[in-house]
Amino acid sequence: MSVIRRLPISARIAVCGLGLGIVVVATAFVLRLWIAQVEARQPNAIEQILANTPLPMTPVTGQSSPEEVRALMLHSHELWQTVQGQATMGWLTSEEGMAEFTETIQIQQFGKVRLEHGPLNGDPTFFWVSDGDSIWQEDLTQKTYSHGAVPPYLRSLEAYSPPRLPTDFGPVVILHPLTGTMPTLLAEDLFPFGTAQTLDDDKHLAVLGESVVAGRNAVILRAESTFEGALDSTILYWVDATTGMVLKKEIYQGSPDSGQLAQHTYFNAVVFDEPITGNPFTFSPDSDLIQATPED
């Protein structure tokens, strides 16, 4: 006679229940592992969008369609590995009119960035540096600095998994992860993946022609927004003809002819895929600065 058969009925039920519980737990674990493997093989949201929008022939020209220019913007981050440049940006303020600033940028994909920000024609007062493992931020006007680890989704594009695109509530804009992380207006120009998703038929898109920005050939794309049937704003994008990066942007309240320029960004100099010399992604804060706390 087996050991289990010699046990009281209550003990036999307990032993059987324990065995069933182990089987259930093991089955659930295997099922979760299988689901994780299946999900790991599925493309993330960025890959899904790119798969639905093929890369157009490059370079685009003044004869290209708005859809072709938009598609190039979507794929822009795939078409370069390093970028170095110096840009001017400005926005309309109620006190000073157009406030303008200068930024220099060095990026090595995926997560290495050096950003320097300062007044127009002045020395930089703000630094943001990522070496792929750590992020440093230094503010000379506040005399503070901060330091933190690079989040997992900035270590590789494959690790970036925003929610799946909804089907019942309309489309959502999925940003490139660096767009929402870099503290600069240039972020959405450097990585126009999210911007391109907003350029739908409601924006009355039109290719206006060709131009040259910072020595690079560009195509001018116009996007208009309306409110209650009237023109609300116009955005002009100077899109790099080869990489799809936005080299210049002007945002108008109304039309460019009769409206007011509310914001602009433009590169004065930019180069792609040339070696980045020195150690721009290594950073040490000034010794007289105070480390900022999360409350600051």
Image: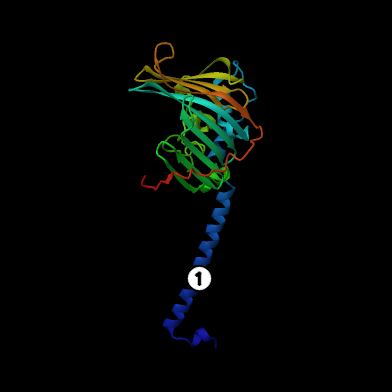
Which percent across, then down, holds residue 137?
47, 41
Q: Is residue 75 visible?
A: no
Query: Dot 1, crowdedness within 10 Å: few (<14), some or many (≥20)?
Result: few
Residue 241, above or below 133: above
Which percent across, then down, holds residue 216?
61, 21
Q: Is residue 193 visible?
A: yes
Which percent across, then down, holds residue 220?
54, 18
Query: On the image, numbered disc 1 is attached to which residue?
Result: 22
Which percent across, then down, holds residue 190?
54, 31
Amino acid type assigned to the residue bearing label 1 in the image? Ile
The quadrant the C terminus occupies is: top left
The quadrant the N terminus occupies is: bottom right
The residue positioned farthest toward the top in the image shown: 257
Q: Residue at x 55, y 61 (%)?
A: 30
Residue 154, above or below 82: below
Label total for image:
1
The part of the image, by quadrant, that contains residue 48 is top right
The part of the image, by quadrant, that contains residue 130 is top right
Residue 287, above or below 210: below
Q: Secondary structure at mark 1?
A: helix
- Viewer-closest of 154 and 223: 154
Residue 72, above or below 294: above
- Viewer-closest of 92 and 286: 286
Residue 207 is left or right of residue 91, and the answer is: right
